[in-house]
Amino acid sequence: MTMRTILVIDDDRDFLNAISLVLEQHGFAVRTAATPEEGLAEIRRRTPDLVVLDVMMPEGHEGFVVARSIREELHLHSLPIVILSSIHVAKQVPYRFAPDEHYLPVDRFLDKPVLPELLIATINEVMGDHREEPKHPL
């Protein structure tokens, strides 16, 4: 069985290091990108098995744009995407973001900080052998 590859896109280098350790301890190969542009370039270079994506990067909402780019521009409708963000706390929005076919075409949305066990369980669930097309494809 080949090692599954996860690409983590987040502008916080400390977070990238920490999540890489957790994922590697659970048997995943990890690639990282610190900007949306690096992340999309990594996906074009070699499509990972799953993307973990932050929302708030320098402009504040790039994760939403990256998710749509993966689906619309790269046409990777079955690539699992897990958003992992602190936007709900940081921006104190009165509503919650969730997977949505028109605005946020991802498999799951988790809040930072996340327990490693929940992150790994979520990743294993969306990468499951019986995984279907995303619930909300474009």
Image: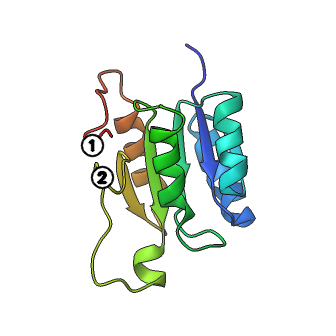
Q: Is residue 52 above or below residue 59?
A: above
- The three-letter amino acid code for the residue at tag 1 is His
In the image, is residue 83 above or below residue 120? below
Q: Are marks 1 and 2 in contact (CB under 8 Å)?
A: yes
Check disc 2 and report the residue beneath it: 102
User: To which quarter of the image does residue 47 belong?
Assistant: top right
Quarter of the image where the N terminus is located: top right
Q: Is residue 102 above or below residue 138?
A: below
Q: Which residue corresponds to the image point at 41% horizontal and 36% vertical from the top-left?
A: 124
111 vs 66, nearest the viewer: 66
Residue shown at the point (52%, 38%) measured from the top left: 73
The residue that mark 1 highlights is 136
Give residue 122's mark. Answer: none
Q: Position of residue 29 (x, y in %)?
A: 65, 33
Work out which quarter of the rendered image holds the C terminus and state it: top left
Q: Position of residue 19 (x, y in %)?
A: 62, 54
Type of amino acid under label 2 = His
Q: Say left or right for 4 vs 113.
A: right
Front residue (pair 6, 136): 136
Q: Residue at 46% of width from left, 40% of height from top?
A: 72
Of marks 1 and 2, which one's residue comes earlier in the chain?
2
